[in-house]
């Protein structure tokens, strides 16, 4: 009888604990984020943010208005133009279609093009670029981004876009390196993917995404349909200029849908991320398979790839000792971020309807606050640490060209309180708020706080002559980086 009583008490206690855990209050976030104050300070019309933890959305809050003309409040279902966050969705569509046997992403993409074909180039004579090379920005194409258009303006076709008959460009998209030899961000490459999909399946990318992603996931406020097309969403945030005024109609039309034509909410972006996270652990995933999730989120480009890139997803960050998949979006008058951990189901999404000077400070502070307050801690790149010998320390201290992201920013290794730290302008933009300490691992490599790659330093005559970035089976050696002590 005593045993039964003890078991019953334990079960009651365990159930009570579960209820308590489920009722954990995250409303403290509102005070911590101080969004209302920042909206006023930076004249940002509106902001919507979602935080997820342990594979569940735990906080969702909206601030400000859809339009400064109407002052109608943003709600959880208000969709924003997400800009480049469209790219991982386009990539996801491609991988799902491949898994269904409808595509082969290792084939040359030109085989699927009908309305237009890839331009001839000395760089593609031996190797015609594949779908995958366009998906991870290693195909070698130009055209980084595009201008938006509005109702009443002439909307260019995809053919005109690729021919360069659009604002920002005066010549046809072209190749400037051999496919697969390096990385270069290309919205034009994703425009080619869109055209290939539409030519092959004889329907719009919006319909394909709805059929294979949005409808199966029951995403009611996410679409690739544009404002000038039937079926566009009605609850949307308008885009604003730096003075807080609505830009033209406030509804940007993006013919280049594949690279930047997605509309969504932070909640539904978070649901896509959580579906991917569940797929990675092969539990509770409904639409995305573990195979697709692993392929998309694995690092597939490292050389010149801003710290690392997957298929659609950015692999640049190592915040809080986690490996992250993420994407940032930035168009005129609107932008945001989606970030998710590869393990444990954590992350966040936010979108804002203001220009860069208005939204960037709010976005940056929000990201740092979430990472600090949630205090997530993973075990990515966890290795035993050893003390850095004094002679090695002296060799490392100095000023270098950017060996972390290869973006040209001056990078310093400095000593404070007997520890080494790395300083750079771009690292400041990418940091969580912690200092970027450089620690020495017992395997002879170095690890940097909030950075996803391991580092191997090589020396000559007492100076660093090269740094090799290492992630899994991939490596990228960067030479001639020393600017002097």
Image (cartoon, rainbow, N blue to C red):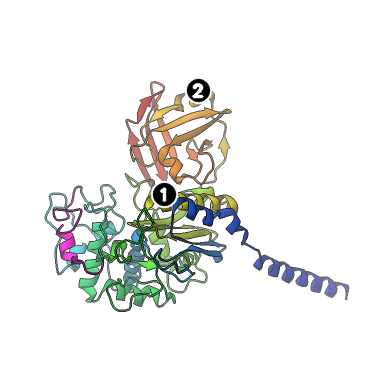
Residue of label 2: 391
Relative to 155, is 325 on the left or the right? Answer: right
Q: How far apart, in angstroms, are the residues tagged by discs 2 and 1?
A: 31 Å
Q: Main secondary structure of the magenta part?
A: loop
Question: Quick check: is 379 in the magenta stretch?
Answer: no
Relative to 190, is 453 on the left or the right? Answer: right
Compare residues 172 and 386 and report the one nearer the observer: 172
Is the N terminus in the top left, top right, bottom left or bottom right quadrant?
bottom right
The answer to whether 214 is drawn above or below residue 67 in the figure is below
The secondary structure type at the circle numbered 2 is: helix
Residue of label 1: 316
Relative to 397, is 261 on the left or the right? Answer: left
The secondary structure type at the circle numbered 1 is: loop
Q: Residue at x 37, y 61 (%)?
A: 85
Where does the magenta region start and end?
Answer: 151-176
Relative image position of residue 324 (x, y in whole percent): 46, 54
Compare residues 246 and 210 and report the one nearer the observer: 246
Is the C terminus in the top left, top right, bottom left or bottom right quadrant?
top left
Q: Residue at x 20, y 72 (%)?
A: 199
Relative to 481, is 290 on the left or the right? Answer: right
């Amino acid at each position: 009888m005593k045993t039964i009583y003890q078991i019953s008490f334990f079960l009651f206690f365990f159930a009570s604990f579960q209820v308590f855990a489920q009722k954990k209050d995250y409303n403290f976030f509102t005070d911590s984020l101080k969004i209302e104050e920042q909206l006023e300070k930076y004249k940002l019309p509106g902001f919507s943010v979602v935080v997820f933890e342990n594979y569940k959305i735990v906080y969702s809050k909206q601030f400000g208005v859809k339009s400064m003309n109407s002052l109608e409040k943003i709600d959880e279902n208000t969709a924003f133009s997400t800009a480049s966050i469209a790219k991982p969705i386009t990539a996801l569509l491609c991988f799902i279609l491949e898994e269904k046997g409808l595509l082969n992403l290792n084939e040359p993409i030109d085989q699927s093009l009908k309305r237009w074909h890839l331009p001839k180039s000395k760089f593609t004579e031996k190797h015609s670029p594949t779908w995958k090379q366009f998906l991870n920005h290693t195909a070698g194409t130009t055209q980084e981004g595009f201008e938006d258009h509005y109702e009443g303006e002439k909307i260019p076709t995809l053919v005109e876009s690729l021919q360069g008959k659009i604002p920002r460009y005066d010549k046809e998209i072209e190749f400037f390196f051999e496919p697969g030899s390096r990385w270069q961000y290309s919205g034009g490459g994703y425009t080619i993917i869109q055209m290939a999909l539409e030519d092959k399946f004889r329907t719009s990318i919006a319909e394909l995404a709805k059929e294979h992603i949005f409808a199966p996931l029951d995403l009611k406020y996410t679409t690739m349909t544009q404002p000038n097309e039937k079926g566009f969403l009605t609850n949307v945030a308008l885009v604003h200029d730096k003075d807080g005024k609505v830009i033209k109609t406030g509804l940007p039309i993006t013919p280049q849908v594949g690279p930047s034509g997605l509309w969504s909410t932070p909640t539904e972006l978070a649901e896509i991320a959580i579906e991917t996270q569940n797929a990675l652990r092969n539990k509770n995933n409904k639409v995305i398979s573990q195979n697709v999730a692993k392929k998309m989120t694995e690092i597939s480009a490292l050389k010149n790839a801003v710290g690392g890139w997957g298929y659609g997803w950015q692999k640049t960050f190592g915040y809080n000792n986690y490996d992250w998949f993420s994407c940032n979006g930035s168009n005129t008058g609107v932008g945001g971020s989606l970030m998710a951990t590869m393990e444990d189901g954590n992350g966040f999404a936010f979108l804002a309807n203001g220009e860069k000077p208005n939204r960037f400070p709010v976005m940056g502070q929000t990201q740092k606050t979430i990472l600090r307050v949630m205090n997530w801690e993973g075990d990515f790149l966890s290795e035993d640490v050893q003390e850095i010998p004094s002679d090695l320390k002296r060799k490392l201290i100095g000023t270098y060209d950017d060996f972390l992201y290869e973006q040209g920013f001056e990078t310093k290794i400095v000593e404070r309180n007997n520890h080494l730290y790395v300083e750079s302008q771009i690292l400041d933009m990418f940091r969580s708020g912690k200092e970027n300490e450089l620690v020495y691992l017992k395997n002879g490599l170095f690890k940097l706080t909030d950075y996803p790659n391991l580092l191997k330093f090589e020396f000559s005559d007492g100076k660093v002559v090269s740094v090799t970035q290492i992630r899994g089976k991939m490596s990228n050696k960067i030479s001639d980086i020393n600017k002097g002590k």
